[in-house]
Image (cartoon, helix red, strand yellow):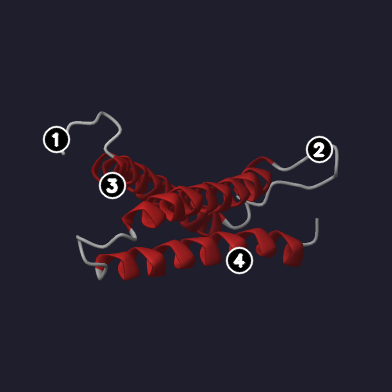
Amino acid sequence: MPVADSFIFYRYFVIANAIVTVYGFLVLFLPSKSQLWRLVVALDMVLTILLTSGISAALAIGSVGRHGNSYAGWLPICGQVPKYCDQVKGALIASFVGLLIYAVLLLYAIHNALDPLFLHKT
């Protein structure tokens, strides 16, 4: 795989994270009594999947960069460019932490907006 092709996956990773970040900031300004919260829960689920797919794409290319692919003839590059691999590792760790936090927030939103246990009395 040419080097330029591998950067497409990282570009997808960065764009997915940017979309989720902008969306998260926009939701902060939504009034708490708004009827849009059910839509927010659905969009949260979609964006959680987008975030997961971006992390998966970057992780796959990071793995190829670290271990290579003997079937395709790609050599590992972390021996020659350790700073690059350390930066990719740091970005992936930060993204996994962010994904965990986002998943907890999603569960909280589901609990508050949809009330799946019917705890609120009407």
Q: Which mark is residue 70?
A: 2
Residue closest to the eye, 99 or 2: 99
Q: Is residue 74 left or right of residue 63?
A: right
The residue tagged 1 is 121
First of labels 3, 4 by sequence position: 4
Q: Mark 3 touching mark 4, by CB under 8 A? A: no
First of labels 2, 1 by sequence position: 2
Judge whether 98 appears above or below 70 on screen: below
**Alpha carbon distance from label 1 to label 4:** 47 Å
Task: Look at 54% across and 67% down and name the residue there.
Answer: 15
Task: Look at 77% across and 40% down and name the residue there.
Answer: 69
Q: Secondary structure at mark 3?
A: helix
Residue 23 x, y percent position in the rendering: 40, 66
**Alpha carbon distance from label 2 to label 1:** 61 Å
- Under mark 4, the amino acid is Arg
Judge whether 50 appears above or below 110 on screen: below
Q: Secondary structure at mark 2?
A: loop
First of labels 2, 3 by sequence position: 2
**Alpha carbon distance from label 1 to label 3:** 14 Å
Q: Secondary structure at mark 1?
A: loop
Q: Mark 1 touching mark 4, by CB under 8 A? A: no
The residue tagged 3 is 113
The residue tagged 4 is 11
Label 2 or label 3, whichever lies nearer to me, is 3
- Under mark 3, the amino acid is Ala
